[in-house]
Image: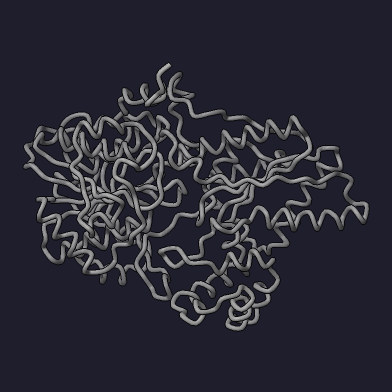
Amino acid sequence: MKPMTKSPLQIARSAYQPKLPNSLKGNVVLNEGAATQSVADQADIKKLFPNTYGMPLITFQAGEKKVYPAVAVGVILSGGQAPGGHNVISGIFDGLKALNPYNKLYGFLGGPSGLVDHKYVELTEEIIAEYRNTGGFDIIGSGRTKLEEEWQYEKGAEICKKLGINAIVVIGGDDSNTNACVLAEYYSQKKTGIQVIGCPKTIDGDLKNEMIETSFGFDTACKVYSELIGNIQRDANSAKKYWHFIRLMGRSASHITLECALQSQPNICIVSEEVEAKNMTLNDVVEDIVKVIVNRGNHGLNFGTILIPEGLIEFIPAMKKLIAELNDLLAHNDDFNTLVTDEEKHQYISGKLTPASAEVFNSLPKGIAKQLTLDRDPHGNVQVSLIETEKLLIEMVAKRLSHLKAEELYKGKFAAINHFFGYEGRCAIPSNFDADYTYSLGYTAAVLISEGKTGYMSSVRNLTAPAAEWIAGGVPITMMMNMEKRHGAMKPVIQKALVLLDGAPFKFFASVREDWASENTRYIYPGPVQYYGPTEVCDQPTRTLQLEKA
């Protein structure tokens, strides 16, 4: 037998033709709505973005054929991977070629740094064909370089002029699209003739609003994680002797954790936004977990599953205050960086914090305290993916249960296994939903560019309907922005969308979680992502979207 170069699924998926909204299947005409404003801090945002603020919403509909002049476009993959990125690029390519066969598409290599360092490749049909409907960002690579300095913008303009590039598409999350908005404003001010369009990417699901119903990759990642959770639950229900503490990716919001709970029905699901709203302490969170474990254990059920959002620590009010102080303290602190031992660093930080935060900091296990002081991410925030919250909770729960056992209030046995699901879902072969959605986003970007638009994000809505009925168009990026503190200074950023406690998905979860936690077992087993079969199996959007649009 010859060694394989591609799996049978890879070969089959390359032939899949993503579905498009009807408005993108032929000739397109733009409808412009009313002027827009930012979600908050309107005066500040307008002052910072005088050329791209207040632009109208755009929707597409079928129209008469137009003749578009040829353009060249550069595309950037920015930030962490998300399933469907390759299909955004495929959609841009196909859209450009449909509008004018002489259009060209370039890919900047390694993320935003490719634009600055002038590293690029022209994307041809032969290259694109290898990556249609595949996971990953390996067609051109990605990176986390932030575009925020004038010299970077000028270097970008230099390579665009050399290649004859008229527009740049930034495929990324909220911070990457904030950079896209800043870039669009700068190029508009300088009258470079370079347009900038964004596409909403992040598996975290926190880039969403009225016009962006979901970010791409969220659907696939949640389906991958839910399969794993279901497999663990089947094992737990078979072995009947382990509690599985499962931490899930999603640093700033609990969308992934909540969606996976809706798909798998675990015994416990922690939602960070609820923890913050109730002003809960870490001990409060532990007590809630312990109550369920004790109840099940006293009925002879010494097993279960607990879903934990990656960013939980940041939503516990006292911890949030501590982290905010640490972010400011460590933003530009050369003294701290000269310290050698962990003990020296711990003592130094403890002495610089407010008394309340110092008390919280000193109460933490040394390992967790150290993790809170590690290098910040490019946005100046603590890297919550490095904080092993699930292990912290296991340690605290075990300690509390031992006290209850000594008091004869707990009759069960406690053994725990910890898991973290993150990278497992970021580069999966996109689900049919994500394959279709991302292709539509890319095609939409091509139309926005050909129509001369800049400072917009591709928008495809009505996502619980069949793809033919989806509504394509563009939303001004400034419409989604507010002012937030970053690296100790106020900066314009796209507002993150957190789980709404009065929203339909959480309210449904809240109505059933006691039943899931009881001595009855309510697990369901989603199984793997399905690419072929009945529509109700293959093309369904997330439970979150279905509940929001019900």
Q: Which quadrant of the view contains residue 282?
A: bottom right
Q: Name the one closer to the observer, 93 or 257.
A: 93
Could you tell me residue 528's position as x and y percent? Answer: 53, 29
Q: Is residue 376 above or below residue 8?
A: below
Give the residue drawn at x 27%, y 40%: 89
Give the residue drawn at x 85%, y 37%: 300
Could you tell me residue 250's position as x and y percent? Answer: 51, 51
Asked if residue 96 can be seen in this view, the reply is yes
Q: Is residue 98 above or below residue 51?
A: above
Could you tell me residue 47's position as x and y percent? Answer: 26, 71
Q: Name the one closer to the observer, 131 or 505.
A: 131
Could you tell me residue 287's position as x and y percent? Answer: 76, 56
What colour scheme governs how the chains and residues are painted in the rendered image of this protein?
A: one colour
For residue 272, side relative to residue 56 (left or right): right
Q: How many marks?
A: 0
Give the residue drawn at x 15%, y 32%: 98
**Residue occupying the far top of the picture:** 1
Asked if residue 549 can be seen in this view, the reply is no
Q: Which quadrant of the view contains residue 189?
A: bottom left
Q: Quadrant of the N terminus?
A: top left
Q: Is residue 447 above or below residue 335?
A: above
For residue 198, side relative to residue 402 (left or right): left
Q: Name the one closer to the observer, 270 or 209.
A: 270
Give the residue drawn at x 23%, y 53%: 56
Q: Which quadrant of the view contains residue 177?
A: bottom left
